[in-house]
Amino acid sequence: MIGAGVAGLRAAIELAPAGQVLVLAKDKPNESSSQYAQGGIAAAVSDEDEVELHEQDTLVAGDGLCDRDAVRTLVQEGPRAIEELLEWGAAFDREGTKLMFGREGAHSRNRILHAQGDSTGREILRSLWQKATAYPSVRLLSFTAITELLESGGSIAGALAYDAWTGDSIEISAKAVLLATGGLGRVYSATTNPDVATGDGIGLAYRAGAEVSDVEFVQFHPTALQLPGAPCFLLSEALRGEGALLRNARGERFMHRYHPQEELAPRDVVSRSMVLEMQRTGEARILLDLTHLPAERVRRFPRIYETCLRYGIDLCTQPAPVHPAAHYAMGGVRTDLDGRTNVDRLFAAGEVACTGVHGANRLASNSLLEGVVFGARAGKAMLDSAAARRLMPEPVRPTLFPRMEETELRSLAWERAGIMRSADGLEDALRRLQDVAWVPHPANATRIECEVRNMHLVATLIARCALAREESRGAHTRTDFPERRLEFQKHSIAKKGNLEVVFV
């Protein structure tokens, strides 16, 4: 398992009885997007909810591009996934003995489970770690960054890794490999993602010949803290579900001008609306206001409240300045519903994968559920590999590394392939990404060198696919093609060796 977040751990639990499972973490074991997931996990488990309603909400948020079979799988298997987490000790918030359900943008029912208000991902990870490490067959290797997948006759035979403890390159043999590397938010200069989210899984898979799908759909979360010296810290959508309001710099509410659901509109709508409002007023910030709410409701989100307080904002009495930031990738390595890619013995699950479940825009709090549901399915599918013979890896083919400063790359992605896009900007991005010096693979390439190579590739794929999609849909907005177009109600596919983006 390359990745120690929700998807990787859930797959490891499924595989553990069948043989030795190695879980690799690029950094500390708990340094993943799962660890920082605040909003919650969505599933139709309350008496007032139905699986069909969860399915419909997901389809609507996906703006015509969801794979219906994937969505149905997610929502139908979601309740059982929640039951398993409860059985394994996950402590979701309750009122007395009853589970508490919140609501977030574009949900028609209260179906979001939280843990400690805003620490849901951390609690789910804790319960999965507890379950996974109970198996003696599960082993964790931390501070181990995968630099390349090892191949054998078109199949995957393992991976090459950089060991941060020794600085050495090590070869890891495996009967099958699961990519559970999380997101790509660090490609952008403003992101809520942790430092490890550099799109590594997409880079590894693409270079091995796997198809990458819908990578142009990057969700920008509307409300990241914007204060000098403060991190780009996520202020969960659950705050707006609790009643927080968005105001412009003049203190005026504005979302009614952009969408009938106002603050609870889909995330892509809210982010675009904030950008348009800042352009309209000439101000560089938006305010998230909770001051009208009772203090006890604000303090239901302790990590958020304490982080803001640390940087001088008391949410009970002061609105917080916020700005959109890259948050989640709807696209990624193309898989079937069992995590299989088009490359033999290579699987993917979680944010790095693209099953089509999110379409053009992820419904809030479906991501943790996706990691649990599709991580389990991938683990089951990989059981077939347990009895397979181990392959002898071929020598790694030499590759070139781009020489580009990380800050320049991230700024370019934000400015040219961010919330608002156009052909001129995307073409400029592609020219600048290609017009760099390329150098041979360094001996014992470091983690940072490999991350920049992956980020450069991912930024190129985003720009290429965004340029090919001549429409606006979900999280993808083209100022030169502002409407949805029926001919683009298809999934984009990019593959090594073919510069043309295909739509299917």
Image (cartoon, rainbow, N blue to C red):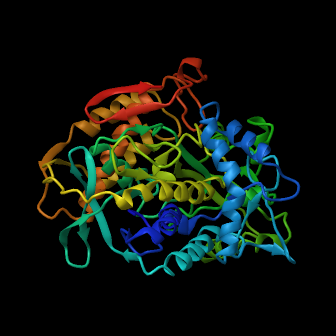
Q: Tell me the quarter of the picture where residue 176 sits.
A: bottom left
Q: In this view, does 103 lie above or below 357?
A: below
Q: Is residue 428 above or below residue 267?
A: above
Q: In which quarter of the image is the N terminus?
A: bottom left
Nearest to the observer: residue 153 or residue 63:
153
Q: Is residue 85 visible?
A: yes
**Residue shown at 58% from the left, 24% from the top:** 482
Residue 421: x and y in percent read 48, 32
* Image-based side of 110 in relation to 62, left or right: right
Total labels: the figure holds: 0
**Residue shown at 41% from the left, 32% from the top:** 493
Residue 8: x and y in percent read 47, 63
Residue 260: x and y in percent read 81, 37
* Image-based side of 78 in relation to 25, left or right: right
Nearest to the observer: residue 355 or residue 290:
355
Q: Can residue 249 be seen in this view?
A: no
Farthest residue toward the front? 387
* Image-based side of 210 in relation to 475, left or right: left
Nearest to the observer: residue 14 or residue 326:
14
Q: Tell me the quarter of the picture where residue 86 sits.
A: bottom right
**Residue shown at 71% from the left, 36% from the top:** 60
Q: In this view, does 396 lie above or below 361?
A: below
